[in-house]
Image (cartoon, rainbow, N blue to C red):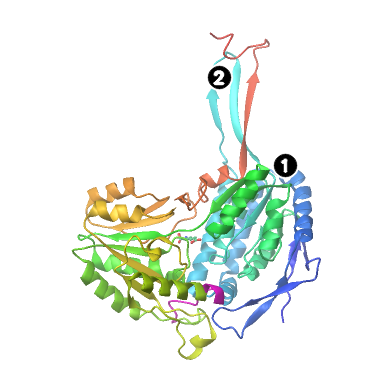
Amino acid sequence: MQQFSNYINGVFVPANNGRVFQNINPADSRDIIGEFPLSDSSDADAAVAAASAAFHSWRLVPAPQRGNILRRAGDIFERRKDELAAIMTREMGKPLFETRGDIQEAIDTCYYAATEGRRLFGYNAPSEMPNKMNLSFRNPVGVCGIITAWNFPVAVPSWKIIPALVCGNTVVFKPSDDAPHSGVIFAEILAEAGLPAGVFNVIHGNAEAGAAIVAHPDVKVIGFTGSTATGKAIAADCGRMNKKCSLEMGGKNAQIVMEDANMELALEGVLWGAFGTTGQRCTATSRLILHEAIHDDFLEKLIARATALRLGNGLQSETQVGPVINKRQLEKIENYAQIARGEGAFCALGGERATDGDLACGNFFKPTIFTEVTKDMRLFREEVFGPMLAVSKARDLEHAIELANYCEYGLSSSIFTANVDAAFQAIRDIEAGITYINAPTIGAEAHMPFGGIKGTGNGHREGGWTVFDIFTEWKTVYVDYSGRLQRAQIDNQ
Ligand code: UN1
């Protein structure tokens, strides 16, 4: 069996305690990908020590030079795209065309960061005193602890790691134990791109390793993507330590379809939003809110189209929907089907595991549509993270927006309409970090702010220019060249 290692101070090493865990292909439980270190706090200590030491010199490398290394990383991701896509599909299940897209998002992020190394703009403002200059600029924070989920094993870590590095920080990364191989490749690529030893470190493992990174006093900022329960626990720990943290947690994203929408487009949108990545995106469409005038007709077409989706191993080119990540998640989704039935929702499609032929060897769940879902039901409000769509009916635009907003989360949202007034009203009134007009709830681009409001996040945005607020601290500088003491707020009154 293939053995994988942690990556600390530029060297691949086993866990100090010698423990390992196995990673299994979700499409085929007979296929064991390999054994990975089950790290503990001593491994976290070693990785943080390496990152702390490397910070002293990395922060002084000019940002454009740091950007050049990240540009080369983008080039290597491009060169290894097909090979890496196959590795990712094998370990987390989504079809190859999706894992290629995942890597493309990392490539985009590398190239964006490379150019940002020549900007990282600060602000200047006039002083209220004569012969005095006021400046502000960004400084790196220090060692960043990056903890991510498995559903975007390269893209989502890249949203944090790459901007953190271009800003002059060093990183300790703990990939999900459901997608650790991608974390190893990340280390290989950054090393080949020329990143100095210790600037980027990877430790594998479960919550124990993650908690050790969060608790370490020399880790100055935590970037986390994952479950709401874990994110809140991390925030509480960081709060006690006065540590900066950026959280990207759950979603319960709604697509609204109005009576005047382009129905074919709206159908394609919801099929991709709800069942792409087997519904395992934090931006996935998990609620569909249909205007009552088109409800029945739209549903009939949607069920026909969803029935035709081809489930299978993501390595096979005809596969449209892959497995769910693990047995635990499969049971959770199954349990939600039971809850929904118990609450009185109608199972119009799926609602059970798929076990035909080879599918029996993997974690497959049929694309599922529940209709007659009302806002008091758990299926309407709680994140399932699987191929399960809850359909509700709205009387008009205001009712549709009210339903969309009736949930704890606020990540992504979408409305299909031909009415420009309705579109702008939705942009204004939907409570979410992202709103799509005539496009599904998934499909964020790397150079735009990404994140959610309400229960989804804690006020930060990854992506684009906003991510630099997570991974830098502002330094304000006053330069007084008057040659005399000028007392602000006193001598100029
Ligand atoms: C996630 O679901 O964790 O917008 C990230 C999208 C992707 C990123 C999703 N570009 O769906």
Quadrant of the snapshot with the N terminus? bottom right
Pointer 1 residue Cβ closer than 8 Å to ligand 1? no
Q: Is residue 154 visible?
A: yes
Residue 382 x, y percent position in the rendering: 44, 62
- Mark 2: which amino acid? Ser
User: In the image, is 291 to the left or to the right of 346?
Assistant: left
Residue for point 52% across, 60% down: 105
Sequence-wise, which precedes: disc 1 or disc 2?
A: 1
Q: Between residues 111 and 256, which one lies in front from this camera angle?
A: 256
User: In the image, is 330 to the left or to the right of 377?
Assistant: right
Q: Which residue is mark 2?
A: 127
Q: Nearer the viewer, mark 1 or mark 2?
A: 2
Q: Residues within 10 Å of mark 2 (few under 14, many from 20)?
A: some
Q: CA distance from mark 1 to mark 2?
A: 28 Å
Q: Which residues are magenta?
A: 318-329
Count of numbered circles on the image? 2
Residue 327 x, y percent position in the rendering: 55, 77
Residue for point 70% across, 62% down: 208
Residue 328 among those drawn in magenta: yes
Q: Which residue is mark 1?
A: 60
Residue 310 x, y percent position in the rendering: 40, 81
Per the image, label 1 sits on a secondary structure element best described as: loop
Q: Is residue 326 visible?
A: no
Residue 197 x, y percent position in the rendering: 76, 56
- Mark 1: which amino acid? Leu
Q: Between residues 381 and 244, which one lies in front from this camera angle?
A: 381
Residue 457 among those drawn in magenta: no
Q: Quadrant of residue 489?
A: top right
Q: Quadrant of residue 173?
A: bottom right
